[in-house]
Amino acid sequence: MEKNKMELAISLGRSMAELRTFMRQYIQEKIKEAKIDITFEMLEVMSLLWKEDGINQQEIADHILKDKSSMTYLIDNLVKRELVLRTEDEKDRRNRLILLTNEGRELKNTLQPWLEEVYSIATADLDAVDLKRAVLTLEKMIDSLR
């Protein structure tokens, strides 16, 4: 790989990590101010369940890129906070489905606007074409590593 191309790839990776850090800090500050007992990682799980309630733990882990033990810990803590519950998958008894409780669904009303706000701020100076190009570039890089 030519040096300039490699340096750009390194810069892209660093920029992605920095963006995630800033977005995480923004959301964590909002959570702290509102005195909500939830971590950013738990919010990632909740956000996925708000889109697709009743999926299994492995699907959640695959989507948010967490290993099985980390996922178990996150789900256990969400269960303790009465935001989700585990139920047996009737199609495959080896799996447990993760379902939102009423409290978990209600939390969306507070947290979802913050997620939308941080993405709106982050993309304020970009148009859809810029974002699509960035997504396609990252997908190509990911495919190269698979």
Image: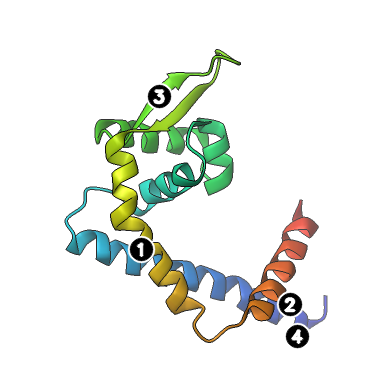
Q: Is residue 120 above or below residue 94?
A: below
The first of marks 3 and 2 along the sequence is 2
Q: Which residue is labeled 2 in the image?
A: 6
Q: Is residue 135 above or below residue 128?
A: above
The first of marks 4 and 3 along the sequence is 4
What is the secondary structure assignment of the residue under circle 1? helix
CA–CA distance between discs 4 and 2? 5 Å
CB under 8 Å between callouts 4 and 1? no
Q: Quadrant of the N terminus?
A: bottom right
Residue at the (31%, 31%) spot, across then down: 79
Residue at the (34%, 50%) spot, across then down: 108
The x and y percentages for residue 43 are 37, 50
The x and y percentages for residue 133 are 72, 75
Side (left or right) of 95 relative to 29: right
What is the secondary structure assignment of the residue under circle 2? helix
Q: Which mark is residue 86?
A: 3
Side (left or right) of 32 relative to 118: left
CB under 8 Å between callouts 1 and 3? no
CA–CA distance between discs 4 and 1? 40 Å
Tell me which amino acid carries mark 1: Pro
Side (left or right) of 26 relative to 61: left
Q: Which residue is labeled 4 in the image?
A: 4
Q: Which residue is labeled 1 in the image?
A: 113
